[in-house]
């Protein structure tokens, strides 16, 4: 009888989150037993059921303009990723600290600009950045919060080595997968879930709503009107927009559903205009208001920024928050933490070379075979060079591109992303993963214990983006250090495994 | 409720109802055309159906003559006819998709499965003997959708806008299907095939049996018109439909603390006119003139609902 668990060990130098040299880490003990005891056919069947489940609910990721099926399913891997309690606590303390500093930085660059005057961040890098919104200067959003929902991408390289790969302070997406993946796991593997004390994630929508309500203008009183603003059904994250609005019990609106009169935002309802207090917007800055930003925007609300400046409506995230997650600003985040909080950074940054700086550029151009080169403004894993995996021609192309527009590129050493056991064609094998936890900032900072684990399904691949063939996993933060052991099913109790 | 949501609910119900009624009208016309063919006025049959359904001008821009083939294609598949069966299903589904979370799963599946089946049909689905089956299937899908809405929707504002759309569209469609045969019903003398035609009128609103139950006598044109216009027991009569419209608008107004507008006045007026109307007076005025007025008042009412709840 073939079982599902000839779990092969990682052959790469990457940190294997499940195995040590001589065994299995305590947090994964129960997963290992489960995989060993479950038939491969059964796992395949469950994987198939999971796929049907996702199709049925309609959790798709729309990719337009690339041909093929525009409504794609992000592959879901049924083997959960486990993070021990102590690991998570260290991580979440670091995330809290980082987001506090990012918000302080935003309040500062749109206010007194002390960090620029102190010379800790180059002035031109901020003020001449595309992400910097002059329109925001002098506006004080409620509670001084700019990035109400932040997604911080983390990678792991060793037991205690977590790196921040990038900050997402504008409109990070993916949280619906965190929630739906857990739902799928609870349905598919109720007993496996029960044997682990997994920290629940289901309260996210409630916490998000609390966060949004907390930043409502004072006049809104106890029951502010919150809406979610979407660009519409053709947006890749439209499913998530509807899902979150539905879970929070708020309206999902398009630009045309809102209008501004006398500096107040209203939505058109069957009972007449209704005043809107907080807009959780999932539209990019440039499209928010054709009167303030791109005049050709059809998805925005004319006059919205004027209403915002007048303090009559809250926008989450605040326009201009993108300056904090710019890849050229990223190297300065540890400095921000020291500057605003007077603390030592708890989470490490990946060393980053800014091709704009001559010294850095020279180094990058002569080490293209070992570095990862990214667009300073890019996202989604597009326009990226992974030096060690690239052909000579690709490296030469990037060489030329960097010389032509050095300011557009940054480079980082190629990290050995940690691996987790993943179901692939040949069986179960280690694949590289990252982690995007979501941090909510309102009156206080809240972090749901969990996040979106993205997994690069191709062997050896380090690119986890869903647009580049990545999948997702459920992420289990354990309440205990180690899971309880299972009795072997249907057999005598004497076969309990000692742990 | 968000105006856009109400708009989509209202229109998805209207398009669905319209698809069903076009199928009814087409089923009866193709049956009648078979009878009339022998008498040589087959063309007249198709022509009056087109006139009644209102797409006449666009049709003649595209086709020289109302042959059976052309009319059937126009009313079932042609993308240029927004009131055709497939385009109606498409528009209904598009609206449903935009307000997916306001619908129940059963409603969504009734529409989505119907659309998926229709769009994969081969052209021979409307040929000869296949047509009645197809039209019967369309009526079934619409009945399924209406049943799903009736049985699974919360009785809140969302339900009321769906119901409002169904009722208003049905009123319009009944008036049109009756108008398609107004000449026949007001003729002084009884022709050879008239009896069959009268049956056809009743069949087009699924009311042949109902006539017998209500009047218990042989078919008479004036009685037929009375049944379809003034009888409250027939669920597709103008009176029943406008009563539904007025009641639903009233329920929405009550739900909003008594906020009312021109659409409420108009709906109340139409309802009262039918409720206290007499068939003899209608025939004196002229059946065609009366029905034409009803159709345009229904359109006006639709505009006022739009102005008050959607644009306002």
Image (cartoon, coloured by chain):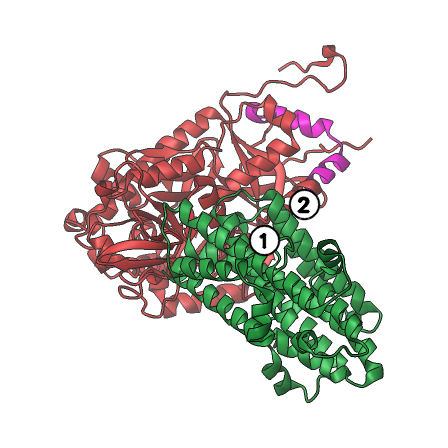
Chain colours: A red, B green
Q: Under tag 2, what secondary structure?
A: helix
Q: Nearer the viewer, mark 1 or mark 2?
A: 2
CA–CA distance between discs 1 and 2? Answer: 19 Å
- The residue drawn where x is 53% and y is 58% is B275
Q: Are marks 1 and 2 in contact (CB under 8 Å)?
A: no
Residue corresponding to mark 1? A469
Labels 1 and 2: the sequence-earlier one? 2
Tell whether position A27 is magenta: yes
Left of B113 or right of it: where is B299? left
Task: Give me the chain letter of mark 1.
Answer: A
Q: Position of residue B49 (x, y in %)?
A: 68, 76
Q: The magenta stretch spans which residues?
A: A23-47
Q: Residue B134's spot in the image, x, y percent?
A: 77, 64
Which residue is drawn at the image coordinates 54% and 23% (left, top)?
A197
* Quarter containing the C terminus of chain A: top right
For disc 2, the marked residue is A52
* Front one among B266 and A260: B266
**Does the magenta run of residues contain A97?**
no
Report the predominant secondary structure element of the magenta stretch.
Answer: helix
**Figure quadrant of the N terminus of chain A:** top right
At which x and y percent is residue B122?
77, 70
Would residue B192 appear left or right of B256 to someone viewing this image? right
Helix or strand or loop: what does disc 1 sit on?
loop
Q: Nearer the viewer, residue A146 or A101?
A: A146
Q: Nearest the camera: B22 or B183?
A: B183
């Amino acid at each position: 009888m073939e079982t599902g668990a000839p779990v092969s060990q990682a052959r790469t130098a990457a940190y294997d989150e499940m195995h040590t040299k001589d065994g299995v880490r305590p947090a994964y003990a129960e997963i290992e037993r489960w995989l060993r005891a479950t038939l491969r056919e059964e796992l395949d069947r469950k994987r198939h059921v999971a796929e049907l489940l996702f199709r049925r609910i309609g959790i798709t990721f729309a990719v337009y303009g690339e041909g093929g099926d525009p409504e794609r399913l992000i592959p879901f891997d049924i083997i959960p990723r486990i993070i021990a309690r102590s690991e998570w606590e260290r991580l979440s303390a670091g995330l809290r600290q980082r987001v506090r500093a990012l918000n302080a930085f935003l309040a500062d660059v749109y206010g007194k600009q002390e960090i620029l005057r102190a010379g800790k961040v180059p002035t031109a890098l901020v003020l001449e950045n595309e992400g910097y919104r002059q329109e925001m200067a002098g506006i004080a959003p409620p509670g001084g919060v700019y990035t109400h929902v932040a997604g911080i991408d983390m990678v792991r390289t060793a037991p205690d080595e977590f790196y921040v790969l990038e900050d997402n302070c504008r409109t990070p997406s993916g949280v619906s997968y965190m929630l739906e993946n857990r739902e799928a796991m609870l349905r598919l593997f109720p007993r496996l879930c029960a044997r682990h004390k997994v920290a629940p994630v289901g309260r996210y929508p409630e916490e998000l709503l609390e966060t949004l309500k907390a930043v409502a203008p004072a006049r809104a009183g106890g029951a502010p009107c919150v809406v979610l603003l979407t660009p519409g059904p053709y947006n890749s994250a439209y499913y998530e927009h509807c899902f979150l609005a539905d879970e929070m019990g708020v309206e999902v609106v398009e630009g045309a559903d809102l209008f501004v009169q006398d500096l107040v935002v209203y939505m058109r309802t069957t009972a007449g205009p209704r005043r809107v207090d907080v807009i959780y917007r999932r539209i990019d800055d440039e499209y928010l208001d054709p009167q303030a930003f791109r005049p050709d925007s059809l998805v925005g609300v004319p006059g919205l920024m004027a209403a915002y400046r007048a303090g009559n409506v809250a926008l989450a995230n605040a326009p201009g928050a993108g300056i904090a997650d710019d890849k050229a600003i990223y190297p300065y985040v540890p400095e921000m933490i020291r500057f605003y909080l007077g603390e030592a950074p708890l989470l490490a940054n990946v060393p980053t070379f800014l091709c704009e700086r001559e010294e850095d550029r020279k180094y990058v151009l002569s080490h293209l075979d070992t570095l990862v080169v990214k667009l300073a403004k890019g996202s989604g894993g597009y326009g990226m060079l992974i030096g060690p995996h690239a052909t000579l021609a690709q490296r030469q192309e990037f060489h030329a591109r960097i010389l032509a527009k050095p300011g557009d590129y940054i480079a980082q050493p190629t990290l050995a992303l940690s691996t987790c056991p993943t179901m692939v064609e040949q069986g179960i094998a280690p694949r590289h993963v990252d982690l995007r936890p979501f941090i909510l900032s309102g009156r206080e900072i809240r972090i749901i214990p969990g996040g979106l684990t993205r997994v690069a399904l191709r062997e050896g691949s380090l690119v986890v983006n869903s647009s580049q063939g990545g999948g997702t996993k459920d992420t289990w933060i354990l309440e205990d250090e180690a899971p309880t052991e299972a009795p072997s099913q249907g057999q005598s109790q004497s076969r309990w495994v000692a742990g | 409720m968000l105006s856009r949501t109400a708009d989509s609910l209202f229109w998805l119900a209207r398009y669905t109802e319209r698809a069903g009624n076009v199928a009814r009208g087409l089923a009866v016309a193709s049956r009648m055309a078979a009878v009339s063919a022998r008498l040589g006025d087959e063309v007249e049959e198709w022509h009056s159906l087109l006139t009644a359904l209102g797409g006449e001008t666009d049709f003649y821009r595209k086709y020289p003559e109302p042959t059976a083939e052309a009319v059937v294609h126009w009313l079932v598949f042609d993308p240029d006819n927004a009131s055709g069966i497939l385009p109606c299903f498409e528009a209904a589904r598009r609206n449903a998709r935009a307000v997916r979370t306001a619908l129940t799963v059963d409603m969504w599946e009734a529409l989505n499965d119907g659309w998926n089946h229709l769009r994969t049909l081969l052209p021979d689905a409307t040929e000869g003997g296949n047509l009645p089956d197809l039209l019967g299937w369309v009526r079934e899908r619409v009945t399924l959708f209406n049943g799903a809405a009736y049985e699974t929707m919360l009785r809140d504002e969302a339900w009321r806008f769906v119901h409002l759309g169904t009722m208003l569209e049905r009123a319009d469609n009944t008036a049109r299907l009756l108008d398609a045969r107004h000449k026949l019903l007001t003729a002084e003398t009884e022709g050879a095939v008239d009896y069959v035609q009268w049956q056809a009128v009743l069949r087009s609103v699924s009311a042949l049996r109902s006539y017998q139950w209500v009047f218990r006598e042989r078919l008479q044109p004036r009685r037929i018109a009375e049944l379809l216009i003034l009888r409250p027991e027939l669920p597709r009569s103008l009176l029943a439909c406008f009563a539904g419209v007025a009641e639903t608008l009233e329920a929405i107004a009550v739900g909003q603390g008594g906020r009312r507008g021109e659409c409420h006045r108009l709906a109340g007026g139409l309802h009262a006119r039918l409720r206290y109307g007499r068939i003899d007076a209608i025939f004196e005025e002229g059946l065609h003139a009366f029905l034409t007025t009803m159709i345009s008042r229904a359109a006006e009412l639709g505009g006022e609902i739009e102005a008050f709840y959607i644009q306002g």
